[in-house]
Amino acid sequence: MSADLTDLGIAAIRDGVAAGTFSAREVATAFNAAVEQGRPLNAWLVETPELALAAADTADAARVSGDLKPLSGVPLGIKDLFATKGVETTAASSILKGFVPEYESTVSGKLFAAGAGMLGKLNLDQFAMGSSNETSAFGNVISPWKRNDGGNASLAPGGSSGGSSSAVSARMAPGATGTDTGGSIRQPAAFTGISGIKPTYGRCSRWGVVAFASSLDQAGPMARDVRDCAIMLEAMSGFDAKDATSLDIPVPAWEKGLSGDLKGKKVGVPKEYRVDNMPPEIEALWQQGIDFVKDAGAEIVEVSLPHTKYALPTYYIIAPAEASSNLARYDGVRYGLRDLPDGANLQQMYAATRAEGFGAEVKRRIMIGTYVLSAGFYDAYFTQAQKVRSLIVRDFEQAFAQCDVLLTPTAPSAAFGLGEKSDDPIAMYLNDVFTVPSSLAGLPAMSVPGGLDGQGLPLGLQIIGRPLDEQGVLNAALAIEERAGFTARPKVWW
């Protein structure tokens, strides 16, 4: 019985516990065993089986007393970017090794208050900077998927939420938290055949989430399907007075509002997303997605987002600039690592700590950010990038005057092998070419599995919606999910 429980998603677990079909403790025990078995994937930085069991026992008692909560009995993985009270939080960086927060992030606190348990903390690209989960100070996360070419190459699970995507895809967790700055929920979801949604900027509190780029960072759920994402997102969202950018608006009942019927809806297809050298399989997937939404009753409209080509360079000015400011707080004084060489003064301690604690990709982005914010180049780079960002926002506003949601591929390829792009930062950054524009505009966007490539690897389709229209995004994704019939899963080799 317990082995089959890891095949269940969030809704099935919630409903099964409520009906008494199985106990929450049985669920937690099964997933704890899956986490232990899955250690070769290096998805978890910290395992907390005792916390999962404690929450399960609370859920079982709640069922008896008739006091079940929305996520009672559901154990989750928490990306190690969320501060968790009493549990080490490192952002996958040596500089935060040993940091145990005395507080809980608002998002993880909301999930636990809704009855969820915690299976552990999930690996990620260091400070969420990366698209392959190869920049973690604690080793690469490995995708549970393999190519069907007879080779045995280890594949990237995407990034930065690669631990989350790997854990959900490998049935080590029914759902997990992710964060998305330029595509870090959607691209790993696409690489591993699961679903993930980045809500409108401000829907989920950033309080207690280790900051990367504050005007872009947004938390969101990663799960097996659209319904599970809707359930998690409802629990994660809501106003938080501790976050100045939190939106003070009601949280809709997204699960209740789910519908795959798109009659009367217009789905936009942005012509600028047909980038040069797009692989034929991605082109075919996109056309398949268009056919899916047409079958669901939608009308297809071609739209233009003329500043799309400037989105990636704009992102790689704004995000490092904000990162260089945010990461200045890690200097050996207040958090984690302190390197104090003999006879060193304060400045030398700062330098030694940061040199030892930050990884190469983090240093690269801090240097880029410091450069574009420097006195002689601020207007030439940062100010210009902010102007282009405004033009990208306007592009979306004009597109949404013609349609309800946009449909694009999520990523320009299927998962690539670990190490294949790590020596070429530009090639790595291009992974986010389809996800970054909506991040710059703060729009809700979701990846849902659309099919497999010739190597048997998952490919994702992306839905982008108007500000605050998560329901429209979820419904369009559901229409695709219902028609794609995606049931592929990785074979257990670990």
Image (spheres, rainbow, N blue to C red):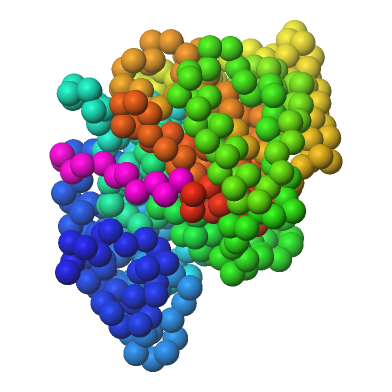
**Residue 418 position within the rendered picture, expressed as x and y whole percent measured from the top left:** 31, 22
Query: Mainly helix, strand or loop, the magenta region?
Result: loop
Q: Quadrant of the N terminus?
A: bottom left
Q: Residue furthest bottom?
A: 65
The magenta region covers 484-494
Residue 218, can we see it? no
Q: Which quadrant of the structure image shows residue 189?
A: top left
Whether residue 171 is visible: yes
- Residue appearing at x 32%, y 62% in the figure: 8
- On the picture, is 92 further left or further right than 22? right
Measuring 38% from the left and 34% from the top, which residue is drawn there?
A: 452
| Of 437 and 351, the residue lying toward us | 437
Q: Please, is residue 120 above or below residue 373 in the view?
A: below
Would you say 241 lies left or right of 332 here?
Answer: right
- Quarter occupied by the C terminus: top left
Q: Is residue 396 magenta?
A: no
- Identified at 62% across, 58% down, the residue is 261
Image position of 175 with respect to 294: above or below: below
User: Residue 84, percent across and down?
Assistant: 42, 55
The number of callouts visible is 0
- Quick one: 480 or 368, which is closer to the camera? 480
Using the image as rendered, state which of residue 115 and residue 253 is in the foreground: 253
Image quadrant in which you'd find residue 81: top left
User: From the viewer's perspective, is 459 left or right of 403?
Assistant: left
Question: Where residue 20 appears, x then y in whole percent?
Answer: 30, 83
Apparent side of residue 400 relative to residue 51 in the rendered image (left or right): right
Q: Nearer the viewer, residue 112 or 464?
A: 464
Task: Give the image location of residue 232, x and y in percent.
Answer: 50, 60
